[in-house]
Every structure is written in C-alpha cells, then in structure tokens.
Image (cartoon, rainbow, N blue to C red):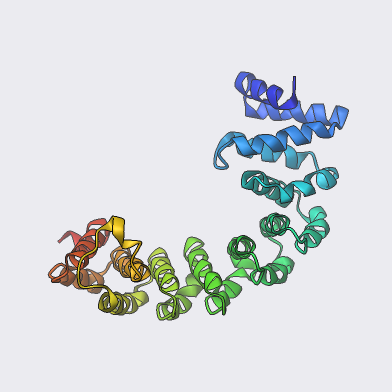
Amino acid sequence: MSTADLFQILCASIGPENARSAILDEWRFNKDVRIVDELVSLLAEEDPKGPMWRTRVEVLAEMGSELLPVLLPFLGHDNCLIRQGVACVLGKIGQPAVPLLLKARQDKDWKMRDGAVQALGRISDPSLVPCLVESVNDEDSNVLESALWALGEVKNSGGARHLIEALENPRQEVRHYAAFVVGEFKVQEGVDGLIKALGDTAPSVRAEAAWALGDLGDSRAVEPLIELFLRENEVLPEADIPVVEAHKQPSFPNMVAHSFAAQSLGRIGGARAVEFLTQALSSKTARTRATAGAALERSRSPEARC
C-alpha cells in the first residue's frame, strides 16, 4: 500500500490530525523520500482551500528542512497546484529554505522562478522585499503576478510602498495586476495611486483601479469614479450591444471600466454616489440605466434604500 493510499484511509478512519501524526512517525522511522513524493502528488488532487490540502502541506512542513533538496525540484512542476503547495511548504519551513529559493528565483524555467517567488512571499521576511520587487520586472507574467501578490502578503513589512509604485510601472500588465493586489489586500495607502490610475492610458488598468477603489471604500474616490464613468460613457457606442457580442467590440475594455466605476460607486455609497447613480437611471442609453440600476441594487448604502 502506498503512503498516499494509507494517508487517505487514515484520514477517513482516525481523522486528519491523527493521520498526520501517523505519517510523520512513518517518515521519522524510515526517512523514505517516496513518502514525500506521494504526499506532494496528492496536492494536485485537492482543493487548496480544503482541510485535506492544508493537512498535507502541514505534514510536509513538519518533516523539516532536511526535505529541501527533495522539495525544491517540485517548484518547477507543470501542475500549478503542486507548485503552490510546495511553495506553501517551503514558506512554512522558513529561513532555512531562503538560500535555495533565492537561487531558484534566477532559474531559466519560469515555473521554478514562479514557485520560488511564491515561497519567498510566504516567509514574510522584510529583508526579502527587494528580491520580490526585482521579480516584478520578470519577463514572465506569471512570475510578476506572483511577485506582486507576495508584496501584498508582506504589505506591512514594506510591500505596500512597492505595490503603489508598481501602479506607475511602464508595463501595462504590471500596473493592471498591481491595482488588483492593492484592492485585494486592502492597501489603504494606495487610494491616491489608484485614483491617479483612473486616468491610465490602458482601459484594463482604469477598470481594475476602479474596482480596487470599491474594495478600499474610501469616499475620496467618489468624484474621480464619477468622472471616469462619464468619460468612458462618451467613448462607448451609442447603440446598446448584447452582452454576448460586447467582448468582440473594440470598446469592450471601456465597457468594463464604465461598469466597474458604477459598481464601486455603489459599494462605496454615500449621498453623492447614490445621487449620481440615481440620476443615471434617467439616461437615454439602456446600458447606462442598467449599469446604474445594478450598482444601486447591490449597494449597501442606506441612501440607496430610500
């Protein structure tokens, strides 16, 4: 019977915690790397948000730093769940893994670089922030997104400042994902940078900045979001386009920015935002009326209930 089968049976019969203890005892007694290989392979079969996946990560992390030479190659695995799981394991192992991860960050294989950056972010060491900033400029979009996400995870250790700076990066994909991360991690210091990004030349960046401002919920964003809504409305086609056809239109990114501006106004709420959206219900364009109506319907602002 394989370790994987044994783990499944033990979890079902005696529960994840007792199964973890049993597998760890087996590892300490035999030191058989096949146990590691089998546990890692199981990471591809479970939901990363589920208890079984987390238990396997914890088991591997508890096996200790002696696993590093065995685990490191898995950072370059083709399966993203395995890369993510091993990055979590190495992050939990912590400082002993840092030298190998810094080396892996320079690997020719983007998957190896991606896994290394994910792991470094999970270690949450302020001294690693400059390395993460360097990886924001990686040629591969997966790696730079992992680096920006990692900066979000260490936002209280210097990462926030670099995320805000990334909103003005020359590369559109960096600005776009930086706006997303600022919103996801509720980087309140990023409000001014996001407001500035509402004027970005790329519609996708404007859209992501608009949504992120809704995540942050700062009332300072209300007037800039109203201005964005009106600007995007001007460049949209006069005729209403069916949703199924909209993505084929050159103006589709502007439609997203237009919609996100309205939704964030509803999410932020307050008298001014609700007043504007209510006025938009009288627009001659059905799309504008529908967008404003949906934003008001989803708004939690007391004014929207009047």
Which of 217 and 260 lies nearest the eye of the viewer? 260
Examine the image and state in which quarter residue 8 appears.
top right
Estimate the x, y position of residue 13 in percent, counting from the top left. Answer: 62, 18
Q: Is residue 144 left or right of residue 187?
A: right
Residue found at x 73% / y 28%: 21
- Looking at the image, is 209 positioned above or below residue 65? below
Estimate the x, y position of residue 173 in percent, counting from the top left. Answer: 53, 70
Which of 301 and 203 lies nearest the eye of the viewer? 203
Q: Is residue 175 left or right of residue 288?
A: right
Which of 298 and 111 lies nearest the eye of the viewer? 111
Estimate the x, y position of residue 243 in percent, counting from the top left. Answer: 28, 57
Q: Is residue 132 left or right of residue 257?
A: right
Estimate the x, y position of residue 300 in percent, counting from the top left. Answer: 27, 58
Examine the image and state in which quarter residue 255 appears.
bottom left
Residue found at x 62% / y 69%: 159
Examine the image and state in which quarter residue 210 appears.
bottom left
Q: Tally the marks.
A: 0
Inspect this view and state whether residue 65 appears: no
Which of 1 and 55 lies nearest the eye of the viewer? 1
Residue found at x 73% / y 32%: 38
User: In what quadrant of the picture does the C terminus appear?
Assistant: bottom left
User: In what quadrant of the picture does the N terminus appear?
Assistant: top right
- Looking at the image, is 211 positioned above or below residue 78? below
Inspect this view and state whether residue 158 appears: yes
